Image: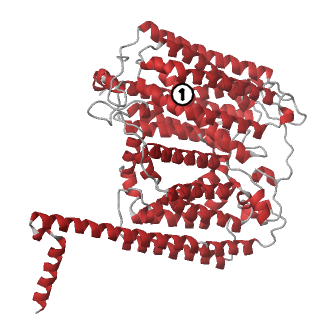
Amino acid sequence: MLDDVTASTETSQNTADTIPGGGRGPRSGLRAPQRGRGLRVLAVAAAATAGLLAAVIALDLGGAVDIEAVPGLSAADPAVTWAAGLLKYAYDLAMLAAVGCTIAAACFLPGREGDRARLAAQSWRWLRVGAAASGVWAITAAVSLPVDFANTFARPLSEVTVPGLWSYIAQYEQGRALGLTVLLAGAAAVVAARAFTIPAAACAAALALAAAVPPVFTGHSASNGNHQIAVDGLLIHIVAAAFWAGGLFALFIARRDPAVAARRYSAAAAFAYPAVAASGLIVFVANVALTDLWESAYGRIALAKLAVLAVGGVFGWAHRRRTLPAVEAGDRSAFNRLAAVELGLMAIAFGLASSLSVTPPPAEELPDPNTALLGFPTPEPISMARILTDWYPSVLFCTAALAMTGFYIAGVVRLRRRGDAWPWYRTVLWCAGWGVVVLTTSTGLGKYGMVLFSAHMVQHMALNMLAPILLVLAAPVTLALRALRPDRAGGPREWLLAAIHSRWSRFVSRPLIALFIYLTSLYLMYFTGMFEWAMRSHFGHLFMTAHFLAAGSLFFWVVIGPDPKPRPLTYPAKVLLYFISIVFHAIFGVTLMMGTGLVAEGWYTQIAIPWVTDLLADQRAGGGIAWGFGEIPSLIIIVVLIGQWARSEEREGRRLDRIAERASASGHPEDDPHEVYNAYLAGLDQERR
């Protein structure tokens, strides 16, 4: 197998050098001199050393390792704090290498000539580096477990026991997060080591990205007064930074100069860097008050990190303007010099970030005990004015709404510029759908949905029924297929088509499977312990919200979606499917209205909102909302189905008329479907006689 991949090097790289439009670029696929490889290795080592030095200086000057003994409490071991900070730096470097190389293998280059699904030689090398980095990442996370245990409970490493460590993993969020990272990073290493196809590389990249997520929901950002905003921002920051830095690392270590890979990385980095900068600023503001910028070590280190990222953005701009065109022309030297400096800056930023992970942020006085649970102070009694004006933005969903709306409008503009039409009402529907998502998650409704079951049910119905209907009717897949340019080397349009026709898409688009996902998630969420878990855990809350939106979008895509789907459904079957969903929604609402036990009783009694006097009455009101909310969406669905059905019959009638005209013109009336049908009816009449 290895011989096959190696033998395909020349062919696959010639394919990678193909320029969209039919021309060919210069022969940039010649092997780099051994001296060039050695210099790149030295540059990577120098960048890692610079980041390590930054981490050490920040740990020392920031005071994270200056332990003050508190009477009556055991003092932390400075060696443990040093180890925790430096292990976090090694963890981050392994993460960015694993994520960057697996994504590069899956997306940066096309497959082999004659078999697009199989990896090209350079992609195979990236994937093997990604496998090694994922293995190191898993080992680093495993080693971090006892160190974090000792650091959390102020114990020396010599006192860490296996039972205590197991208890830490089973009962504490930080331990569970690191344990999950060990499993996911190890799985990414195994998949990447065994992969020889692009889909397998994409699976390894997905596992690597998933492994980066769990620790985001623990630590400083998850424990402050604005933890929902801080965690959302940190989630975007970590993923975007891993792609930005890891992708550049993958390009830098490549043995060849693939122009296609450079172009694709450049296009994606143009979105990744603004995401890194904006999310970093959000996390910074959420964790540090303006008065603590210079007075706290945490604030000074965070400012230094933001400054380094800003300089890195300047180098990224220089890459796009100067060195990437040089790569297209076959000159790699300018790219190597600039990329080496940029990698050094990125390593310094990661070194500063690792020191922040063990540097305590400025002490924050919470307005009330519920702030630590909710992420905001206990809200005042609900009113329409407070719902509309008292915003608490969901950074993740606002970012998704902004990005999706921007991409959709860009696609419409591209169609209009080349003279193609696109219905204006579809654009309005798309913007309205994401507007519903933002209003549901980021206005005062987002706050009251955490403390009132009735307000939460309004959120649920809007995310599960109203927003998906608007988004599905906007036909985003059709727009993307028309707006994206075909790429013979395989690009976003080809990836989208592959996803539509994949086995997974064919499976979930089965009508009964889509209905099952849509309905069972409703009952499982509220009649098991999942709802209370979702209210207590920010990850659970994000998962619940995203699942409602995704499950609703899948179901309504099957029922009324104008986009292409692998399993078309007849209109009578669509009507039947939708009425079944209405019946089960009604049963769910009536069950809540007649229930005598509280859903998530532990959560609502713990937060004990003073102006909510009857929790059961509020829950029954939520059941009434679930029962009655579906009337407006049902009316929309029925009108849309009738209109689509009528247009389908009209198209079928015009098709039959065209066949009849061709049959008459060719002198073969027996090919006319109308005549065939008339003959069939005449035959039935004769049989009855």
Secondary structure under badge 1? helix
Q: Give 110 or 88, whichever is nearer the viewer.
A: 110
Q: Is residue 596 left or right of residue 425?
A: right
Residue 364 coordinates in the image, percent (x, y) = 84, 41
- Residue drawn where x is 48% and y is 11% of the image: 333
Task: Give the residue number, with chain letter if any, for mark 1.
Answer: 246
Residue 421 coordinates in the image, percent (x, y) = 44, 52
Q: Residue furthest right?
A: 71
Residue 110 coordinates in the image, percent (x, y) = 36, 32
Above or below, comparing residue 350 to residue 390 in the picture: above
Residue 639 coordinates in the image, percent (x, y) = 48, 72
| Quadrant of residue 216 within the rendered picture | top right
Question: Dot 1, crowdedness within 10 Å: few (<14), some or many (≥20)?
Answer: many
| Quadrant of residue 280 within the rendered picture | top right
One can see residue 597 in this view: no
Q: Give 640 or 508, whichever is nearer the viewer.
A: 640
- Residue drawn where x is 13% and y is 91% of the image: 688
Q: Is residue 208 left or right of residue 383?
A: left
Q: How many marks?
A: 1
Image quarter of the C terminus: bottom left
Q: Is residue 295 left or right of residue 328?
A: right
- Residue drawn where x is 57% and y is 64% of the image: 466
Amino acid under disc 1: Gly
Image quarter of the N terminus: top left
One can see residue 118 in this view: yes
